[in-house]
């Protein structure tokens, strides 16, 4: 039985049972056994995290940055072992996806978080010298991170964006591994613990448990000692956690569900339909469709160009190899949700059947409906079929297409393809005005699959894409604000103020709002 990391020690879990990860390419269980922790483990982790949170109040942003940089370096030293484990647990290609994609992204965002912690501008220090009132975003307290199944490195609970943001904001993290890749998360936690010890971080700054009961998970996110939670995963489980956290008044930042609508206007199809068909097929089937920004809903206007486009992408889905899914659960959920759409009246163009029995997979699938069908039951028609599939919706007019967009739930992304000559401009304006408030990131003439680690990125959106439309899970320093609380100091004596709010700038680089003007200078 693998050990848990609690209060700075790798020790035996207080386990109610155990589980094993599976190799998606063979369906075979991997050898290692991982514990399902009881509440006793959660309780001890919370106690250690609460103590670490107190200790971190006396740790500077520079020191936290040293930990994050040391952790990134430790990951690079152990990159080969991490990639091998992640490949065994996810079947993702080692070179193109893991070593060449997620690994550099992971270390890059850790170093970006380090830079943000060192500089301090993310905390929006604000000083009003006339009233003697000063405020800044400070650490919120222990953060629990639930990692997703589809990004074992860059979104991992002990390595990804939520982890990096929570640590950079000055909080300890309790990492809850995803059951699809517990071994990968364990390797990251080992690297993090070594980096924490080398840089003198408080005991319990990074802890790891693998799995709990649903009841204990809900109890964990609502405990008095927790500051906030970051969760990426299924809508059903996420809403259960949200309900528990909301009842306790605890912030929880969720990424739950998104069909990521792509509207392709007639002028764009006439101008470059074959090119768009290639882009869409590649985006939808990349990584077997297991991206949170996978284009799961295609919006088109009826016409001959649309018919040709649908024929083209149907052929591409038919000819493309069937990728491997992450787990039996993903395979089962994809088949089940596609059947929901078919039962609601969607026409099958290709797929919706079992594929290779030797691995977790399901046939590349395209379904088609009319806009009238969509508008008759918009909730069912927005069922997310997470994987290598998409639903095509054909409207009779721009007005009807805009009406479809107006009924959409919140999404991470929305995209509109238009021609370069301007013939689609009026339709674009009408559709974009509806789509803008339905999505966190609006794209033009570009598929949504990539999520750049940029300060300008919003990987968020209205519910149920996420739990709160004002925050991003990707993009530093913005992502740090989820794990901070606004702390105001009124008439507090100068020597008692945090360094970042004292008259003298702590480093000469932090941007502070002083009497309404942003400056890097000291006061006076």
Image: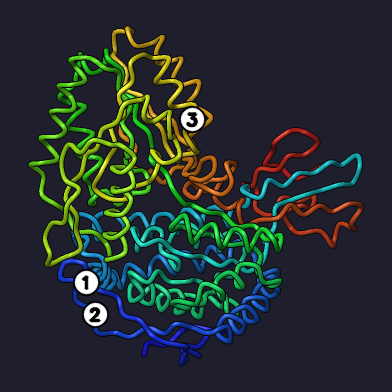
**N-terminal-most mark, 3 or 1:** 1
Residue in front for this viewpoint, 99 or 3: 3
Callout 1 environment at 10 Å: few (<14), some (14 to 19), or many (20+)? many
Query: What residue is rendered at 40% in x and 75% in y?
Result: 191
Residue 64: % across, % down: 57, 65
Judge whether 66 appears above or below 447 on screen: below
Mark 3 or 2, which is nearer the eye? 3
Residue in front for this viewpoint, 465 or 47: 465
Callout 3 environment at 10 Å: few (<14), some (14 to 19), or many (20+)? some
Q: Are marks 2 and 1 in contact (CB under 8 Å)?
A: yes
Q: Are marks 3 and 1 in contact (CB under 8 Å)?
A: no
Judge whether 464 appears above or below 196 on screen: above
Kindly state the secondary structure of the residue where label 1 is placed: strand
Q: CA distance from mark 2 to mark 1?
A: 6 Å
> Circle 2 sits on which residue?
30
Residue 250: % across, % down: 67, 61
> Circle 1 sits on which residue?
23
> Circle 3 sits on which residue?
407
Query: What residue is rendered at 26% in x and 54% in y?
Result: 335
Query: What residue is rendered at 35% in x and 81% in y?
Result: 19
Kindly state the secondary structure of the residue where label 3 is placed: loop
Q: CA distance from mark 3 to mark 1?
A: 39 Å
């Amino acid at each position: 039985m693998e050990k848990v990391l609690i209060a700075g020690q790798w020790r035996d879990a207080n386990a109610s049972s155990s589980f094993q990860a599976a190799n998606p390419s063979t369906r075979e269980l991997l050898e290692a056994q991982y514990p399902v922790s009881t509440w006793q483990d959660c309780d001890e982790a919370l106690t250690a995290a609460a103590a670490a949170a107190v200790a971190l109040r006396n740790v500077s942003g520079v020191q936290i940055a040293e930990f994050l940089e040391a952790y990134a370096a430790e990951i690079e030293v152990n990159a080969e072992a991490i990639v091998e484990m992640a490949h065994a647990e996810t079947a993702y290609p080692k070179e193109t996806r893991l070593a060449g994609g997620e690994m550099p992204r992971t270390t890059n965002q850790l170093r970006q978080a380090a830079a943000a912690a060192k500089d301090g501008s993310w905390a929006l220090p604000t000083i009003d010298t006339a009233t003697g009132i000063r405020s800044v975003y400070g650490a919120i307290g222990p953060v629990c991170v639930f990692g997703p199944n589809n990004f074992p490195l860059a979104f991992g609970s002990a390595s990804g964006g939520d982890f990096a943001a929570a640590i950079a904001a000055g909080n300890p993290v309790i990492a809850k591994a995803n059951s699809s890749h517990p071994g990968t998360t364990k390797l990251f936690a080992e690297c993090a613990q070594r980096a924490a010890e080398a840089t003198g971080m408080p005991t319990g700054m990074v802890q790891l448990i693998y799995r709990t009961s649903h009841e204990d998970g809900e109890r964990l996110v609502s405990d008095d000692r927790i500051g906030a939670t970051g969760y990426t995963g299924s809508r059903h489980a996420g809403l259960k956690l949200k309900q528990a956290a909301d009842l306790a008044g605890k912030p929880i930042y969720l990424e739950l569900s998104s069909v990521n609508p792509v509207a392709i206007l007639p002028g764009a199809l006439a101008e470059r339909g074959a090119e768009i068909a290639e882009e869409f097929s590649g985006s939808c089937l990349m990584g077997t469709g297991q991206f949170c920004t996978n284009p799961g809903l295609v919006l088109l206007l009826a016409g001959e160009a649309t018919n040709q486009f649908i024929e083209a992408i149907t052929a591409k889905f038919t000819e493309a190899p069937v990728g491997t899914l992450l787990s039996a659960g993903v395979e089962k959920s994809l088949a089940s949700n596609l059947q929901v759409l078919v039962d609601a009246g969607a026409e099958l163009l290709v797929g919706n059947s079992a594929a290779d029995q030797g691995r977790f997979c399901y046939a590349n699938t395209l379904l088609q409906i009319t806009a009238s069908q969509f508008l008759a039951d918009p909730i069912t028609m927005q069922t997310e079929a997470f994987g290598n599939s998409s639903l095509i919706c054909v409207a009779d007019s721009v007005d009807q297409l805009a009406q479809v967009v107006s009924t959409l739930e919140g999404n991470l992304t929305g995209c509109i393809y238009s021609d370069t000559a301007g013939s689609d401009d009026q339709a674009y304006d009408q559709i974009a005005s509806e789509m803008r408030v339905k999505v966190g990131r609006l794209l033009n003439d570009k598929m949504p699959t990539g999520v750049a680690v940029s300060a300008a990125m919003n990987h968020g959106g209205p519910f149920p894409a996420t739990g709160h439309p004002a925050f991003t899970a990707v993009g530093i320093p913005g992502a740090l604000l989820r794990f901070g609380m606004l702390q105001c100091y009124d008439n507090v004596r100068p020597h008692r103020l945090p360094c970042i709010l004292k008259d003298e700038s702590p480093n000469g680089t932090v941007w502070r709002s002083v009497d309404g003007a942003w400056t890097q200078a000291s006061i006076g």
